[in-house]
């Protein structure tokens, strides 16, 4: 990965997000292009507003797991996603709202990706085990039968 230029690709439809540079932005109706774009990425970024006080597993996290992309996450402390990322070893997470920590985690994750080839399979396994519609249906049926 070090031999290639690192580029951050941001999926955001908010007009104010376009003002951020030097990021590449993909906006509007591009859902059919996302799998191809994800295939060119090494890591997915999950950034939640630090003022969140509730648990939140964003849809983009689910799509990253489905695509086999480990995540670099910056989320509120105590969020369920923290334990999930750590216990499943599908990326790194920072909860202190520190750019220094986020940068360190990004460097650690890129280094780890060079050493550990199991990230993609762990991400896809997590997606299949917890987030696919079939899994949700089985959980709902089991809950209704008990």
Image (cartoon, rainbow, N blue to C red):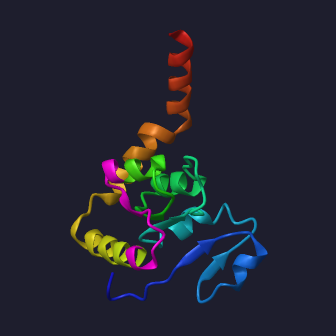
Q: Residue furthest right?
A: 15
Compared with 88, 31 (above or below) is: below
Quarter of the view holding residue 47: bottom right
Which residue is found at the position 49% from the left and 83% from the top? 7
> Residue 93 location, x and y as percent?
40, 62
Which residue is found at the position 63% from the left and 66% from the top? 33
- Foreground: 33 or 47? 47
Is 131 in the magenta?
Answer: no
Locate the N terminus by quadrant: bottom left
> Residue 13 location, x and y as percent?
73, 69
> Residue 43 location, x and y as percent?
43, 68
Compared with 30, 5 (above or below) is: below
Q: Which residues are magenta?
A: 86-101
Which residue is found at the position 36% from the left and 58% from the top? 120
Compared with 129, 75 (above or below) is: below
Quarter of the view holding residue 37: bottom right
Q: Is residue 70 left or right of residue 134?
A: left
Quarter of the view holding residue 10: bottom right
Is 96 in the magenta?
Answer: yes
> Residue 108 location, x and y as percent?
30, 73
């Amino acid at each position: 990965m070090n031999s290639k230029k690192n580029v951050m690709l941001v999926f955001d439809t908010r007009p104010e997000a376009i003002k951020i540079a030097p990021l590449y932005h993909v906006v509007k109706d591009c859902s059919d292009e996302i799998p191809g774009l994800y295939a060119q990425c090494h890591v997915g970024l999950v950034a939640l507003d630090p003022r969140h006080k509730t648990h939140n597993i964003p849809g983009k996290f689910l799509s990253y797991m489905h695509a086999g992309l480990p995540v670099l996450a910056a989320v509120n402390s105590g969020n369920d996603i923290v334990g999930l990322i750590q216990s499943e070893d599908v990326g790194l997470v920072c909860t202190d709202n520190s750019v220094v920590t986020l940068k360190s985690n990004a460097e650690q994750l890129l280094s780890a990706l060079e050493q550990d080839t199991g990230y993609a399979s762990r991400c896809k396994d997590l997606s299949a085990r917890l987030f696919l519609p079939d899994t949700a249906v089985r959980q709902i049926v089991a809950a209704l039968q008990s």
